[in-house]
Image (cartoon, rainbow, N blue to C red):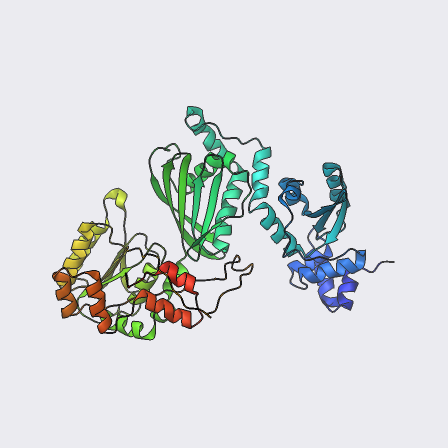
Amino acid sequence: MAQKLGEILIRRGATTVEEVADALAKRHPGERIGEALVRLGYASPREIARALGEQTGLEVVELKTLAPPKALIETVPARFVFKTRLVPMSRENGRLVVATADPFAVHDLDELRLLTGLDVEPKLAASDEVEDAIHKLYGVGADALARAQEDGIVVIAEDDEASREKDLDQDDDAALIQFVNKVLLDAVAARSSDIHIEPEERDLSVRYRIDGVLHDAKLPRELKRFQAAILSRLKIMANLDIAEKRLPQDGRIKIRASGKELDIRVSIIPTLYGEGVALRILDNEGLGRGLGEVGLAPDGQKLFRELLEVPHGIVLVTGPTGSGKSTTLYAGLQEVDRKSLKVITVEDPVEYRLSGVAQIQIKEKIGLTFARGLRSILRHDPDVVMVGEIRDRETAEIAVQAALTGHLVLAHGHHLAALGVTDMKHVRRGKGCESCRQTGFRGRCGIFELVRVDDGLRELAIEGATQVKLRAYARERGFKSLRDDGIRLLREGVTTPEEVALVTRDEGR
């Protein structure tokens, strides 16, 4: 007589008699004992798989490196895989090998035989590896998309008047709602800063920006036919006009994921093959870092703190989108004595709440622009002003005028670094793994160039000196460029030559 699963787990030391008894008492209706033990934290999915293998005589396999050919994946419909949790592994001599965490799902195995016309050989795998493999092979939300497809959701021509009403119906569909939610949650779990949804002639491209680099999202291939429905759903979430498809629109979505609230900026633009969407995920947690946590070198921190102590002037933080300008500004504000000084910010959006700071949210729809907000707060006699972004000449002029009339102004604008080349060798490189999506990188670290504007530099600027002369003057006084700071991280084993070359430029040009 075959041993019970609980007895095998106890003998193998994977759990205890008391834990098995507790799991039996707390099982949900229809839940197997192994599932209950995992849910209660008494045993790992891998331990359950090994015990099931001993009980049934089936081979236990690992799925972390599973990469079946595309033709095999398409043999088994995504809807069936998500329903049964049977993962195709290989096909040999008319036999289909599948992985499962449940060796007793005989009915599902019989159904798969009828569906494919092949003999089916099951192998055991840990339940968490089965879930990861399904996600990897079929894409996040494939079950919801397959269900929507079977429910008959189709896209009508965008210039058809009736399509506007159809879009509304599509967005009421629970499967589509679930799919869009899964895409957002998958991006958050992957630590994405942005999601780009880009319509093409025969495809709908979805990419995540992770640590500054774009990666294709692991999504089902049948996205194009759901393009209008996905766009309508995102518009509804962002309180935008779903009927407007000719003009750009901007909005905002707030979601709760992994126990924290996230703001998502939504920007929609009309393109040749439909509307393109850019979603910027604002994770407020990183904005609470101090100067010592954003990547500034010790001498850079010292100089930044000295600049924050001057009674008036302007500290301008520049860099490309997503490079950490806001994070750096907030780190600087935390160094300011907010009890004895009046600090006001004008931002879009207010990304991080700071005690002792009056923060103003820009609302361009009602005329509250950066320029108007900045002009207004100067009447409140602030000591320190932070401008979230200098977008136009008017805002820049007001910020400079404020700096000249007794205010310390912190602000950020955009300058884009050109590519350069580095010849440093014998440095550390990441090999790549599942955690970093085979890139060799995980997380980001800022590089900085910080210069104090003294009388000499000011005179050179007034005279219209070239950039080469300005940099040469600064270098004589110990200035370190972005390239220099990148090389510092290179020597510390934090980054690679290719990454430094990608984000800095050759000062010799």
- Across and down, in percent, residue 337 comes to 26, 70
Return the residue nearer the eye: 397 or 449: 449
Taking depth in this image into account, of 181 and 207 the one nearest to the observer is 207
The residue depicted at 37 percent of the width and 64 percent of the height is 446
Quadrant into which the C terminus falls: bottom left
Residue 223 is situated, as x and y percent measured from the top left of the image, at: 52, 38
Which residue is depicted at the point 43% across and 46% down?
Answer: 196
Q: Is residue 498 left or right of residue 43?
A: left
Asked whether 500 or 134 is in front, the reply is 500
The residue depicted at 50 percent of the width and 62 percent of the height is: 440
**Residue found at the very far right of the displayed protein:** 1
The relative height of residue 462 versus residue 131 in the rendered view (above or below) is below
Instruction: Please determine whether, in this image, residue 342 is positioned above or below residue 71.
Output: below
Q: Is residue 347 visible?
A: yes
Image spot of residue 33 (x, y percent):
73, 57
Q: Quadrant of the N terminus?
A: bottom right
Image side of residue 405 versus residue 196, left or right: left
Residue 448 visible somewhere in the drawing? no
